[in-house]
Image (cartoon, helix red, strand yellow):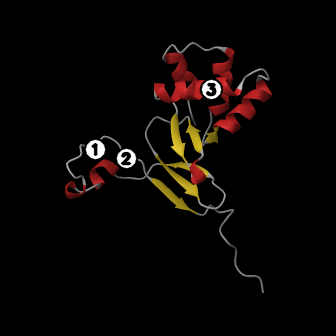
Amino acid sequence: MSDLLERLRARGWRMTPQRRVVAEVLDGDHVHLTAEEVQARAAQRLPEISRATVYNVLGGLVLLGEVAEVSALGGAKRYDPNAHPPHEHLVCTRCGTMRDVHPTGDPLTALPEEERFGFTVLAAEITYRGLCPQCVPGPPHG
């Protein structure tokens, strides 16, 4: 479960009504919403919130490092409030469902030295792709 609201309070982030509603929309387990989905849900709670405000709040949360921006299928960016601890994502290639996963092992050490081309690797982003249980074709009917 995300603790986004608590993390923002602990950082002393000024909680305007617009910022609060965006943070509340994002707060949750396995939440990976697009900006448009955040806008729609925020507008249900605070009808006067503008699209520009939602984008600005999301950008600020990403800059703070409290929300991760994740690329999904089709290039749509999604916003993940579960930024701590770092984790990877599992994405359904059919419906786009996205889940947080925590594989064992360190992806930074998994890249052999000869494949680093002299780079000092600071971070790794891995996305596992497959079919979720709802999209796996069922057995043939006969």
Look at mark 1 in the image and give the residue it sits on.
121
Q: CA distance from mark 3 to mark 2?
A: 26 Å
Q: Residue at x 71, y 32 (%)?
A: 39
In what quadrant of the picture does the N terminus appear? top right
Residue at the spot 67% in from the left edge and 64% down from the top edge: 135
Q: Earlier in the sequence, mark 1 or mark 3?
A: 3
Image: 108 above or below 55: below
Kindly report the distance in space between the C-alpha atoms of the residues bearing marks 1 and 3.
Answer: 31 Å
> Percent x, y for residue 104?
38, 53
Q: Amino acid at mark 2?
A: Ala
Q: Residues within 10 Å of mark 3 (few under 14, many from 20)?
A: many
Q: Secondary structure at mark 2?
A: loop
Expressed as whole percent of the image width and height from the top left, the position of residue 112 reads 24, 57
Image height check: is 124 above or below 66? below
Point 72% across, 81% down: residue: 140
Q: Nearer the observer, disc 1 or disc 3?
A: 1
Which residue type carries mark 1? Val
Distance from Cα at disc 1 to Cα at disc 2: 8 Å
Cβ atoms under marks 1 and 2 closer than 8 Å: yes
Crowding at mark 2 (Cα within 10 Å: few <14, some 14-19, many 20+): some
Secondary structure beneath disc 1? loop
Q: Report whether residue 106 is seen.
A: no
Tag 1 and tag 3, C-beta contact below 8 Å: no
Helix, strand or loop status at disc 3: helix
Residue 124's tag is 2
**Residue denoted by label 3:** 23
Residue pictured at 34% horizontal, 52% vertical: 105
Nearer to me, 29 or 78:
78
Indicate the position of residue 117 as horizontal and vertical percent values: 22, 52
The one nearer the camera, 82 or 73, is 73
Checking the image for residue 20, the label placed there is none
